[in-house]
Amino acid sequence: MPITTQPDRRSRADQADILLAFVDRLREHPQLNEQNAIVADQPVPDQFPGGGYCIVVAPGPGEFPGELWTGGGHATATEDGSVIVGCYASNRRDRPGRRESALFGRRHQATPAAEQQERPSLLRWKRDILSLLTVENKAHGTMSQAWEPMKLGIPLCRDIPAPKRSTGILDVPEHPGWLGFQLTFSIAWDWDLYA
């Protein structure tokens, strides 16, 4: 029986542990590390690191289901919340087609692989983020288990995180030359109020 169907094997959680599990999972990508995959209080950081791209994990809004609180009070302090993952890339060229380059990573489909950018494009980042935060092991394809945030091997959420919303790709306000998008994942967890 998968662990996701065994509530007695789940843990109460702190929101910080969930955010750290998300960013740790993203840092498994070969091009992400502690400098360009970060946890922040908002999905758009004040400053972007060098390197031309940045992934930000931030807490999103949540609600506390009244029916659970009414039935169990603090023992069922469950939050139906969210995690926002922001993905940002700089435009390296100030010429026509720069947005296409940031979006696709190359000017045209016919561009030879050797001429393509080394860093992933925004659409490639979107796919990679969705894959990392939903698929436990890509090698298993559709037979893979779903990824879920854990601490010391114990799941932190009531349900498996699910992608719920994606923004369009837009200029990043107050950061000229940067484009980005945000993915919102829904999560539900029981707060650890007794630590």
Image (tube, rainbow, N blue to C red):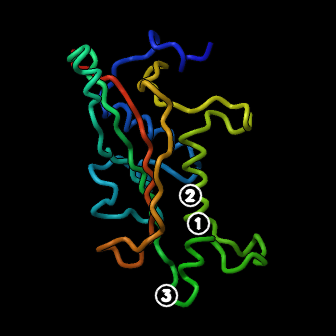
Of labels 2 and 3, earlier in sequence is: 3
Is the residue under label 3 in contact with that under label 2 (CB below 8 Å)? no
Which of the two residues, 180 or 48, is positioned nearer the viewer here? 180
Decide: marks 3, 1 in contact (CB < 8 A)?
A: no
> Considering the image in quadrants, where does the C terminus appear?
top left
Q: Is residue 20 visible?
A: yes
In front here: 72 or 150? 72
Instruction: Please name the residue that numbered disc 1 is placed on.
Output: 121
Rendered residue at 57%/71% (across/down) = 103
Please tell me in which quadrant of the rendered image residue 109 appears: bottom right
Which of the numbered marks, if any, corresponds to residue 146? none
Give me the residue at 66% from left, 80% from top.
Answer: 107
Q: In which quarter of the image is the N terminus?
A: top right
Circle 3 residue: 94
Q: Please, what is the three-letter code of the amino acid marked with disc 2?
A: Trp
Residue carrying label 2? 125
Looking at the image, can residue 51 be seen?
A: no
Q: How far apart are marks 2 and 3 (CA)?
A: 22 Å
Residue extending farthest to the bottom is: 95
Mark 2 Cα shell of 10 Å, populated few (<14), some (14-19), many (≥20): some
In this rendering, the answer to whether 25 lies above or below 100 is: above
Q: Report the residue that reaches farthest toward the top.
A: 8
Label 2 vs label 1: CA separation? 6 Å
Inter-mark Cα distance, 3 to 1: 17 Å
Give the x, y percent position of residue 134: 57, 39
Q: Residues within 10 Å of mark 3 (few under 14, many from 20)?
A: few
Q: Residue at x 33, y 73 (%)?
A: 175
Note whether 6 is above or below 179 in the view shown.
above
